[in-house]
Image (spheres, rainbow, N blue to C red):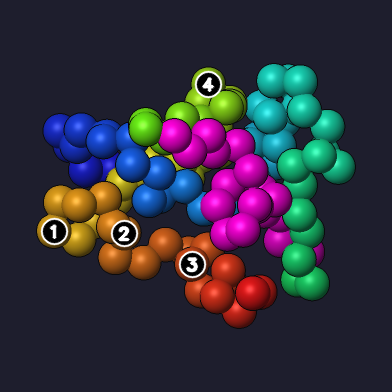
Amino acid sequence: MIKNHKCKRCGKCCHSPRLFSKDIERINKAGYKEEEFLYIDNFNNNYLKDKKGWCMFLNKGKKAECKIYKARPKICRQYPSEIRNNNCQPIELAFDKYLENRN
């Protein structure tokens, strides 16, 4: 995670990340059922479902908001680790290639 990064709430980082078992547990505890949010790919990897390439829990408006901020996945908690030109555009996130190949 980059120190002193100030989130602009632009939503550029809000795609559908890979989920780990602890992430799934947190989201379940937040009141969501797995069939509502969990997508399992052909390799048995877990991801958050998306809406047109964006995380299903992203509220896009003037300022982007996460509906499950307190229960957000680990990768979201650790973001950003590396960004381009201080504009929140990631160099490359693990799930970017996955989304490209899936669409």
Q: Can residue 1 be seen in this view?
A: yes
Q: Which of 46 and 37 is in front in this view?
A: 37
Amino acid at circle 1: Asn
Q: In this view, does 71 lie above or below 50?
A: above
- Which mark, by number, is residue 96? 3
Q: Marks 1 and 2, Cα distance to the nearest angstrom?
A: 9 Å
Could you say where residue 44 lies in the image, as x and y percent from the top left? 78, 64
Q: In which quarter of the image is the C terminus?
A: bottom right
Whichever of callouts 1 and 4 sits on the residue coming sooner in the sequence is 4
Amino acid at circle 3: Asp
Residue drawn at point x = 37 percent, y = 31 percent:
63
In the rendered view, does 14 fall on the left or right side of 103?
left
Residue drawn at point x = 76 percent, y = 71 percent:
43
Whichever of callouts 4 and 2 sits on the residue coming sooner in the sequence is 4
Amino acid at circle 2: Pro
Could you say where residue 2 lies in the image, as x and y percent from the top left? 21, 43
Q: Marks 4 and 3, Cα distance to the nearest angstrom?
A: 23 Å
**SS state under label 4:** helix
Check disc 4 and report the residue beneath it.
70
**SS state under label 1:** loop
In the rendered view, does 75 fall on the left or right side of 36?
left
- Read off the magenta span: 44-61
Q: Do the residues labelled 4 and 3 touch (CB within 8 Å)?
A: no
Q: Do the residues labelled 2 and 3 touch (CB within 8 Å)?
A: yes
Q: Residues within 10 Å of mark 1 (few under 14, many from 20)?
A: few
